[in-house]
Image: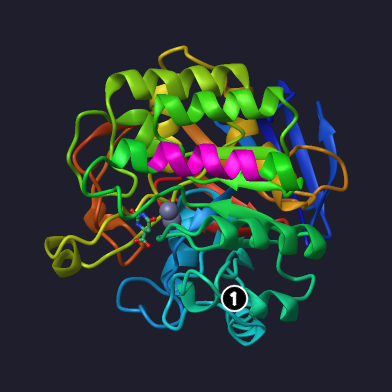
Amino acid sequence: MEILIKAARIVDESKDFLGDLYIKDGKIEDFGEDLNYTCKVVDGQGLTLMPSFIDLHVHFREPGYTYKEDLDTGGLAALRGGYTLVNLMGNTNPICSSMEIVEYVLKRGKELDLVDIHQVVSITKDFDGYTLSHLDDLDERVKFISDDGKGIKSNIVMYKAMIKALEKDLTLMIHAEDEDLTPIDYRISENIITIRDIYLSKETGARLHLCHVSTKEAIEEVRRGKAQGVNLTCEVTPHHIALWDNDYKVNPPIRTKEDVDALIEGIIDGTVDAIATDHAPHTGEDKLKGAPGLSGIETAFPVSYTSLVKNGKIDLKKLSKLMSGNPGKIMGVRKGKIEKAYDGDVVLIDLDKEILIDSQKFLSKGKNTPFNGMKLYGQVMMTIKGGEIKYSNKDL
Ligand code: DOR
Ligand code: ZN
Ligand code: ZN
């Protein structure tokens, strides 16, 4: 399959130029000015072409909670949001604590052939907070372990998990929360586990990725840890950088303007490695019962673009680094950059188009979002994966 995209503004973490891009046999074969190939041509005039986005943190709810989302609707929603690779969290039913479930998810993902999928396995078996023996059974298809949705209270368990992760070459994705403290002070709850886990990583050498960092204290700890050479990366979510003083139910909660400013400072100085959605679809009924989370994969780019680039805080190259380049690096894939022989996964965006968020139009089953009714910029017009058009906005 071949495709040539003509006359677009081409942007990745280190490039920003007007030109053409040619994809052949699933890979980026050529890019530059005035390319000529006889194949399908897409007119990119007036549009911006970027590497498609890579989401390090997603809940597609399979198996077990398919009334909230499944791999089909999640994959379609991801493509609509400009994503072609997602890292799926294991707080499913059953919890993903075995290769059997990993294999089930990967097989179904392949059959659906929408986006590329990586499955995260739980740190403790069935999220019991203690058992680590299942980690011995994991093979190289698993790169990340996480008890996301829950914190790990025990210091010794986290210490042993880090030793095991080192041995198995796994990255721990940390949902930093002490659930005993949460009802009293959710700020201390996030900060204390962040401090503990960075300290344990420093002592053990285990590779850590901190999920959805949301407080100014936590971001300062990440900055300090990195300066000391700790093996550390972190992500922030679009909602934690775009909203403050808002009581929409999500874990960790929406913080204050001071926290938002600190996260953006962390983005600017490189403390923050990635923007990840924590896409957490729920039914209306479950939200009324207090389920935390928001359906975020279809709004991540416009929310991030509007709150970071449109207002001049960072440039588009930097946003590409946060949403594609660095996540690709963290996942160890040849995706997320406009480079020859990288995967031909790109997205065409209309940056100037104002969009009114209407969650009823989401392809995700989860219509839960605090962004409903907001006017944002940056419409995904087309998502191409391996040279194949997987999503096209009907306005095009
Ligand atoms: O808001 C959240 N929702 N935070 C989490 O950690 C879990 C997630 C979910 O699975 O719904
Ligand atoms: Zn989490
Ligand atoms: Zn999550």
| Residue at 56% in and 50% down | 55
| Residue at 68% in and 44% down | 201
Ligand 3 quadrant assignment: bottom left
Camera-nearest residue between 35 and 255: 255
Q: In this view, does 30 lie above or below 90?
A: above
Q: In this view, does 284 lie above or below 294?
A: below
* Boundaries of the magenta span: 190-200
Quick check: can you spot residue 147?
yes
Does the segment drawn in magenta span residue 195?
yes
Residue position for label 1:
109
Please rate how many residues cluster around mark 1, counting C-alpha atoms within 10 Å: few if below 14, some from 14 to 19, many from 20: some
Find residue 220 and report its horizontal and vertical position in percent.
51, 23
Mark 1 falls on what kind of element?
helix
Does the segment drawn in magenta span residue 177?
no
Q: Is residue 359 left or right of residue 120?
A: left
| Residue at 68% in and 28% down | 226
Camera-nearest residue between 280 and 150: 150
- What kind of secondary structure does the magenta stretch mostly adopt? helix
Q: Which amino acid does label 1 sit on?
A: Gly
Quick check: can you spot residue 45?
no
Find residue 292 and report its horizontal and vertical position in percent.
27, 56
Q: Quarter holding the N terminus? A: bottom right
Find residue 118 and report its horizontal and vertical position in percent.
64, 65
Q: In this view, does 233 lie to the left or right of 375?
A: right
